[in-house]
Image (spheres, rainbow, N blue to C red):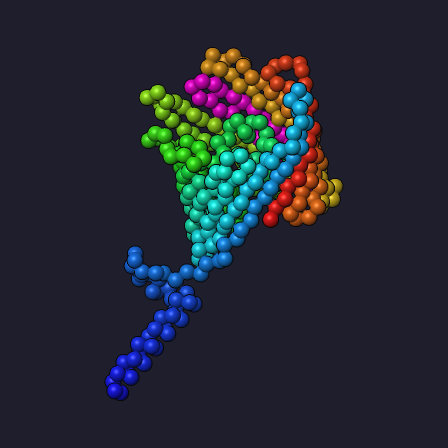
Amino acid sequence: MKRILFVASMVVTFLLHSATVLASNESSESAASAGINDEVPVVTSTPKFSGFIINNYLYEEGEGSSFNLRNVNLSLDGNLGDNFDYKLQVAFAGSPKVSDAYGRLKFSDALNVQIGQFKLPFSLENAISPTSLEAFDNSQVISTFCGGRDIGVALYGSLGENKFAEYSVGVFNGSGTNKADADKYKDYVGRLIINTPLDGLAISGSFHLGNPEENGARVAYNRFAAGFKGEFGRLFTRSEFLWGSDHEFSAYGIYGLLGYKFTPRLSAFGKYDWMQMENSTGDTWAETNYVTTGLAYRLNSKVLFRLQYQLMQADDTSRYLNNVGGAVTIQF
């Protein structure tokens, strides 16, 4: 009887000790020696639910006016341990679709890995969320040259004590959002940002290189971007020049933005946006010029009101079109 009680007490002690180790996640030795089918203890955060809604009204000369539900995005993100996080974002405006679905393994400030579907690391403006963008839409050169989101894997990080350089470079399917690779070839995309010694000023360069297969032959698909951004007291600015080509056309474009913060809540901006497209013989077949100005008022950290006026000249004509609108962004 004593032997049975002794054995039972030893088993109970062992189980209690094991539970304590798992709960505290302090035993690195047991984690390192765990087999592929063993459970490695992990401290997880409660998944965070968030999202945003953007509604706007827009009058377009020659097209009429409309209230629009521009964005309805819901996100779920969290941590699985100290060095792994994840995000799932679904866009519901129009046909529902997954926009972000990725995990990130964080080794250090200098080296991290991101895998799944996410925004391509190309250009400065492409990385800005619609909730923070000054205008209603991206600059036309960004919409034309940037591939949006794709599925792949990327390395990213920052170098130097003061994040002197920030980089991101990856390999992607090249097929776009929620699509498997259409051929056996991949796209290579990268961005480098240098934070200069001049406080508030950063310069950047980006590339997107691909050779997709069309009708049994490989064709070139190359995009490049160079630009800068800066914040100097109440002034803020951003500009990028983008160019690219493939077997059917080549294109060039530039935008420049200058803004001013009157108060922490009220700001204004002006932007010029130009793009030209040429066919394979070098003939210009499309040229557009946009001039955009706007005001933004932040009611609080979650609600933003914006007014915008845009003057557009398209297709080498002397006719100018006027667009006027307002928008409200709600984050939760």
Q: Is residue 24 left or right of residue 6?
A: right
Q: Mostly what secondary structure, the magenta segment?
A: strand
Instruction: Find out whether residue 249 is within the magenta segment.
Output: yes
Image quarter (top left, top right, bottom left or bottom right) of the N terminus: bottom left
Question: From this viewpoint, is residue 159 visible?
Answer: no
Vertical placement of residue 28 versus 190, above or below? below
Vertical placement of residue 299 versus 81, above or below? above
Tell me what residue is drawn at x 30 percent, y 76 percent.
11
Instruction: Find out whether residue 91 is within the magenta segment.
Output: no
Residue 300, how many percent across, how many down? 69, 48
Q: Quadrant of residue 181?
A: top left
Magenta residues, start to end: 233-257
Residue 262, how many percent across, how many down? 74, 41
Question: From this viewpoint, is residue 86 visible?
Answer: yes
Vertical placement of residue 276 versus 71, above or below? above
Q: Quadrant of residue 187?
A: top left
> Which residue lies most toward the right here?
262
Residue 325, how many percent across, how many down? 68, 31
Q: Is residue 273 left or right of residue 250?
A: right
Tell me what residue is drawn at x 30 percent, y 58 percent.
37
Tell me what residue is drawn at x 37 percent, y 64 percent.
28
Residue 267, how many percent across, how many down? 71, 39
- Image mark count: 0
Tell me what residue is drawn at x 46 percent, y 51 percent.
85
